[in-house]
Image (spheres, rainbow, N blue to C red):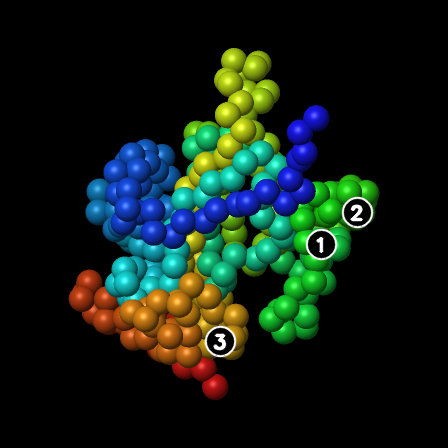
Amino acid sequence: ASAVEEAPLYLFDRTFAKKCPELLKDFEGGLRETCPFWCAEWDGVNGIDEGGDGGGRRGYHDLLRVLGEERRPDYQWLIVGPKRSGSAFHIDPNATHAWNAPIIGRKRWIFYPPGSTPPGVYPSPDGDEVCMPLSLGEWFLTYWDAHVERRKDEDVTRRPLECTACPGDVLFVPHGWWHLVLNLGEDGEDDGAVEDRGVSVALTRNYVSASNLPDVLRFLDTRVSQISGCRDREEAVKPEDLGREFRKSLLNFAKEEGDDGSSCEECKSTSN
């Protein structure tokens, strides 16, 4: 029998939109139609009501765009890996939300809510370091029984959530949630009618919207050492400047849109 890799390689390409722009365009239209609140552009047609107050205020759900494409942290990736590859438990960077759209292959997701750390995961008090099993296989073998017990937590708000995402689905990943992803391949889809190519391909994007803006600004002010996605690109805003530059760009953008900035009170505050 052929050997099975314990920790298969899982590739994240942050430059795919420049190298293969048509790939992103193939999906942008469908996402705009079905999930307009996750798109990068202003929706000047439907008028999304982000505040939920019925005011019809236009929603802008990728606020880091105000920094400019080259100055903002990395935010979108093409992800490719074989069956049994995936991501160990982590919280998405910079307090951002994310969406994930499988293109080929199914993905099994396990989520733990904020304040409920997964079994076998030991973050340092400041969150700078995390100790956990090196591979997904090790976590499943060692901590699965503990995970099953956590499903029975009397406090339902602390229970983990699980789902399987398939091609055609778009999964929302809220900021601050621990999550693990295991690529399952295509076997089992449509009663076996789909040939299992043994590979997983997905698109994902991290973003800041009105719902997590205060948390993002607080993170940028207080967790500078944990800011990621901008340290290895000369043109990107440096971590120590990111909070200040983001606020400045948000206020300038609001003024250009005819807003005096009153709708972005968080932008006016500064860190202590």
Q: Separation of disc 3 and disc 2 at Cα?
A: 33 Å
Q: Name the residue under label 2.
A: 142
Q: At 68% from the left edge and 72% from the top edge, which residue is drawn?
A: 125
Q: Which amino acid does label 2 sit on?
A: Thr
Q: Is residue 188 left or right of residue 202?
A: right
Position of 244 relative to 186 (above/below)? below
Q: Is residue 178 left or right of residue 30?
A: right
Q: In this view, does 208 lie to the left or right of 60?
A: right
Q: Separation of disc 1 and disc 3 at Cα?
A: 26 Å
Counting residues from the start of the chain, the first of labels 1 and 3 encountered is 1
Q: Measuring from the top left, give residue 189's x and y in whole percent.
A: 55, 20
Decide if residue 104 is in sight here: yes
Q: At 63% from the left edge and 45% from the top edge, which residue is drawn?
A: 7
Q: How many marks?
A: 3
Position of 238 relative to 18 (above/below)? below
Counting residues from the start of the chain, the first of labels 3 and 2 encountered is 2
Q: Name the residue under label 3.
A: 224
Q: What element carries label 3?
A: helix
Choose mark 3 or mark 2, whichever is in front.
Answer: 2
Q: Which amino acid does label 3 sit on?
A: Val
Counting residues from the start of the chain, the first of labels 2 and 1 encountered is 1
Decide if residue 108 is in sight here: no
Q: Is mark 1 on a helix, strand or loop?
A: loop
Choose mark 1 or mark 3, whichever is in front.
Answer: 1
Q: In which quarter of the image is the N terminus?
A: top right
Q: Separation of disc 2 and disc 1 at Cα?
A: 9 Å
Position of 59 relative to 266 (above/below)? above
Q: Nearer the viewer, residue 152 or 239?
A: 239
Q: How crowded is mark 3: few (under 14 residues within 10 Å), some or many (20 or more)?
A: some
Q: How crowded is mark 1: few (under 14 residues within 10 Å), some or many (20 or more)?
A: some
Q: Measuring from the top left, give residue 175's x and y in whole percent.
A: 52, 56
Q: What residue type is labelled 1?
A: Pro
